[in-house]
Image: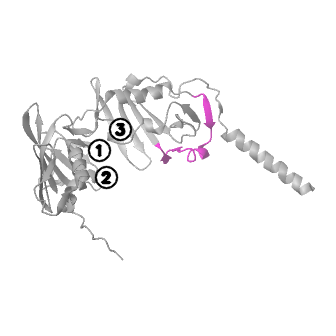
């Protein structure tokens, strides 16, 4: 090894040592100290979570419970919120992963590059903001308090603990007829009206079936299940606004089901597509809240056609003998 090579080896070794010094997780001088000083969950009156793709949800404390902001008081699940806040209470500054602003984007805790931005509005009017980033280990994530350069590897915390979508904080079941016995279903859209009825044996019959056709049994079962256990992606509010398209819906589904021996009909309206989320507005008549449902769920009704219910029976082919 010549002199130049020895110098290059020494320089490389020094660079590696410096890199290890800067980036290697180490025990912090504030070892065991909480990530958020003097923080308790009962101080929080509003929780706002932003995600990497621009999604955002805000939750507000009302009395002893929580609601989704901007939805006319739709209830959030208090237990989920309390469990998430408790993870921040327990978060410690034990393992420092970095201490320079240049590392923030790489660890996904920068102000403009993060997995989650968690803003905590407190009862005294102050606010605490925590950025939750990449997870180099199971049930651990990089976290940074806004205004500080130091990044900590925090155990028992990941971005998934703080959903940036309303669906992560609510009971998404909008219409639940799982305990009922559906008897009939009629769907009307631009392609026509399609009717299903159960016979005495409990089998579905399609009113438009022709000789030489068989039912698409799997598709029918999937459709009935989706409607009798209809899930929302987000609550919208109690007002039916013109832009929701529910006065002139793209699809209407009427389900009649037996509950406690009595028949009851439920009507589901699917309206316009929300340009921001790509989801569709929906309303079950008699329910207080307009909601959004996924495009897949909505389009299973809006583009439904006859061929989704029946298909031609396969034609038998006569054997060919040599």
Q: Is disc 3 surrounded by few (<14), some (14 to 19) or many (20+) residues within 10 Å?
A: some
User: On the image, numbered disc 3 is attached to which residue?
Assistant: 168
**Numbered label attached to residue 277:** 2
Q: Which residues are magenta?
A: 93-115
Q: Is residue 276 above or below residue 119?
A: below
Please report whichever mark, 2 or 1, sits nearer to the chain's N-terminal start: 1
Residue 124 visible in image? no
What's the CA distance linking mark 3 and mark 2? Answer: 16 Å
Q: Residue furthest left?
A: 262
Could you say which quadrant of the image residue 42 lies in? top left
Label 2 neighbour load within 10 Å: few <14, some 14-19, many 20+: few
Q: Nearer the viewer, residue 289 or 259?
A: 259
Query: Residue 190: where, in percent of width, then height?
Result: 15, 62
> Is 18 in the magenta?
no
Q: Nearer the viewer, residue 56 or 228?
A: 228
Front-most of residues 291 and 56? 291
Residue 233 circle label: 1
Q: Residue at x 55, y 47 (%)?
A: 105
x and y percent of residue 89 in the render? 47, 25
User: Where does the image place residue 26, in percent across and percent down from the top left?
Assistant: 66, 32
Q: Is residue 78 above or below residue 163?
A: above
């Amino acid at each position: 090894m010549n002199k130049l090579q020895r110098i290059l080896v020494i320089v490389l070794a020094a660079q590696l040592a410096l890199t290890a010094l800067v980036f290697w997780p180490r025990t912090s001088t504030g070892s065991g100290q909480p990530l958020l000083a003097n923080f308790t969950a009962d101080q929080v009156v509003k929780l706002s979570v932003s995600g990497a793709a621009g999604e955002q949800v805000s939750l507000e404390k009302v009395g002893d419970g929580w609601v989704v902001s901007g939805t006319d008081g739709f209830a959030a699940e208090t237990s989920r919120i309390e469990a998430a806040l408790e993870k921040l209470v327990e978060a410690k500054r034990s393992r420092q992963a970095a201490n320079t602003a240049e590392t923030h984007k790489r660890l996904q805790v920068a102000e403009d590059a993060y997995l989650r931005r968690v803003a905590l509005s407190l009862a005294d009017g102050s606010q605490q903001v925590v950025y939750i980033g990449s997870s180099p280990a199971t049930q651990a994530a990089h976290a940074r308090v806004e205004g500080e350069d130091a990044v900590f590897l925090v155990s028992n915390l990941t971005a998934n603990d703080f959903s940036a979508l309303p669906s992560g904080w609510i009971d998404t079941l909008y219409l639940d007829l799982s305990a009922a016995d559906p008897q009939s279903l009629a769907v009307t859209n631009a392609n026509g009206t399609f009717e299903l009825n159960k016979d005495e044996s409990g089998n579905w019959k399609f009113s438009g079936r022709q000789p030489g056709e068989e039912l698409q049994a799997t598709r029918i079962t999937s459709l009935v299940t989706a409607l009798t256990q209809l899930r929302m992606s987000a609550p919208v509010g109690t007002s039916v606004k013109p832009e929701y398209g529910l006065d002139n819906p793209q699809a209407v589904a009427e389900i009649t089901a037996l509950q406690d021996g009595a028949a009851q009909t439920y009507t589901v309206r699917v309206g316009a597509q929300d340009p921001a989320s790509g989801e569709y507005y929906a309303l079950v008549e008699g329910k207080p809240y307009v909601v959004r449902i996924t495009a897949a769920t909505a389009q299973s009704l809006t583009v439904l056609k006859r061929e989704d219910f029946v298909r031609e029976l396969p034609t038998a082919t006569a054997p060919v003998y040599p």
